[in-house]
Each structure stands twice: as C-alpha cells, then as structure tokens.
Image (tube, helix red, strand yellow):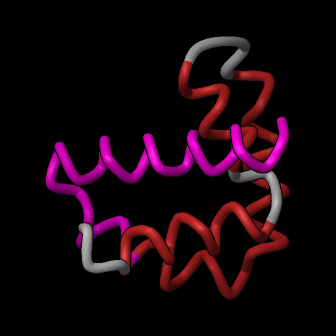
Amino acid sequence: MNEEQRLSAIQDLAERLEQRRFVTPARMFLDVVVPLGFLASQVALLLQPFFPYGRWRSYVTALTDEQGWEALQRILNSEEC
C-alpha cells in the first residue's frame, strides 16, 4: 500500500467515524493508543488475516505502522471533524 492509498483509507475511516458520531470516543482511544504506536501497529498486523478483503482490510493495513495511527489522530483532531 503506497502513501496515497494509506491516507485515502485513513481519511475514509475518519469520515465513517464522523458519520456514526464516534469521533469523541475515537479521539479518547487514540490518545491512549498513539503513544503505544508500535504495540498498536503490531496488533493491527495480528488482525490482518481476519480481514482478507474489503474496506476493513484497507483500514487495518493503513494502521500497521505508527504513522497511520498518528495520521488518523491528526485528521480526527483537525477542524473538519
């Protein structure tokens, strides 16, 4: 997954969280997870086989490194959400 696809998947995830009004719980979750970025990335790698296809696969793949978690937090903390 290249950087453009990663950002697109993360943006889509943020939009879906906003549609379902889960932005505040997601922000609280990310406040805990982002400092533990390496561990969160390893959990995402562990979950990858359980999502063989579909948009969930792209979300999990986008969050398999610390930069993905940080990007999601940045998007959710921006003025748009």
Is the residue 63 above or below the residue 19 in the image?
below
Q: Quadrant of the N terminus?
A: top right
Q: Residue furthest front?
A: 4
Residue under the point 73% across and 36% down: 47
Q: Quadrant of the C terminus?
A: bottom left
The image shows residue 9 at horizontal and vertical percentages of 57, 40
- Is 18 one of the magenta-colored residues? yes
Q: Residue furthest top?
A: 53
81 with respect to 13 (left or right): left
Q: Looking at this view, is 29 or 68 the one in front?
A: 68
- Is 11 one of the magenta-colored residues? yes
The main secondary structure of the magenta stretch is: helix
The image shows residue 77 at horizontal and vertical percentages of 37, 80
* Image: magenta residue range: 1-28
Is the residue 71 above or below the residue 18 in the image?
below
80 with respect to 62 (left or right): left
Q: How many marks?
A: 0
Residue under the point 56% across and 28% down: 56
31 with respect to 50 (left or right): left
The image shows residue 21 at horizontal and vertical percentages of 15, 54
Snapshot quadrant of residue 79: bottom left
26 with respect to 2 (left or right): left
The image shows residue 38 at horizontal and vertical percentages of 84, 72
Residue under the point 79% across and 51% down: 64
Snapshot quadrant of residue 76: bottom left
Is the residue 77 above or below the residue 59 in the image?
below
